[in-house]
Image (cartoon, grey):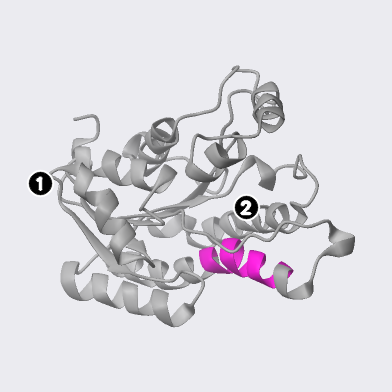
Amino acid sequence: MRYPEMQGKVALVTGGSSGIGLATVEAFARQGAKVIVASRDKKRAQSALRGLGGTADVEWMQCDVSQGESVKKLCAALKSKHGRLDYAFNNGGSGARFSKVGDAAEEAWRKTIDGYLTSVFLCLRYQIPLMLKGGGGVIVNNSSVDGLRGYPFPGGAAYSAAKHGVLGLTRSAALEYAATGLRITAICPGWVDTPPVARAMQNAATASEIVRQTPRGKIASADEIAESVLWLCSSAASFMIGSPLVIDGGYMA
């Protein structure tokens, strides 16, 4: 066990049914944490979690992170059942609509911003008071290398804007609570082997371009990103506050 301090602690992972989220659920469970998977689709979550085995202390709670009342109910349920929240990985996001800025519909813009930025704000809004009542904790927000530069293919401006916003929100919130025992930070993954990326890479030209953009010569596994999230949550990263951890195989170098 790499992080014995996590044993028995309460960890929340939004969007934990697949990809980076599911890998992070597995990583927390291996450290003996009590893991809550928050997502919209119960059947999909239960199917994913069956693969964890019977020894993992993992439960599912329904939540649409783009809706404030839903996030509020989730955190109230966490408080009622566990009395505390020690770690949160705000990974859930949905609703991206890809089109060039000059062609984009206003509603499509709003859906993307709500799905990938407002959702993180809502999670912070209700996680922070719960963590402060327990004496502190760690929140890791999932941004992207797309929060550090423009989107590399046409049509991703709204998504990139949302991910830039996640970093601004993370840095500002981190400064507000730095002296309280609550750490807030973010990760900026590059290309990762997740279901959406796997679908995109079915196109040979797209796959070649994605690999070309990564000096490491391959895309990251979800497990590699999950291990970085756990490190950020651990006491080994106690001085990581606000500044994002870039995990990109050299992409931004």
| Crowd band around label 2 with a 10 angstrom C-alpha radius: few (<14), some (14–19), many (20+) | many
Q: Is residue 34 visible?
A: yes
> In this rendering, is residue 39 above or below 253?
below
Q: Which label sits on residue 8?
A: none
Q: Magenta stretch containing residue 126, yes or no?
A: no
Report x, y in % for residue 205.
72, 29
Rendered residue at 58%/61% (across/down)? 116
The type of residue carrying mark 1 is Gly
Q: Nearer the viewer, residue 105 or 69?
A: 105
Rendered residue at 26%/53% (across/down)? 47
Q: Magenta stretch containing residue 116, yes or no?
A: yes
The type of residue carrying mark 2 is Leu
Q: Is residue 252 visible?
A: no
Report x, y in % for residue 174.
53, 56
* Residue behind mark 2: 167
As drawn, the residue found furthest toward the bottom would be: 69
| Crowd band around label 1 with a 10 angstrom C-alpha radius: few (<14), some (14–19), many (20+) | few
> Is the stretch drawn in magenta largely helix, strand or loop?
helix
Quadrant where the N terminus sits is top left
Point out the stretch of residues depicted in magenta.
Answer: 109-120
Report x, y in % for residue 18.
39, 48
Quadrant where the C terminus sits is top right
* Residue behind mark 1: 54
As drawn, the residue found furthest toward the right would be: 102
Report x, y in % for residue 107.
72, 75
Q: Secondary structure at mark 1?
A: loop
Q: Secondary structure at mark 2?
A: helix
- Residue 239: image quadrant is top left
- Residue 190: image quadrant is top right
> In this rendering, is residue 195 above or below 190?
below
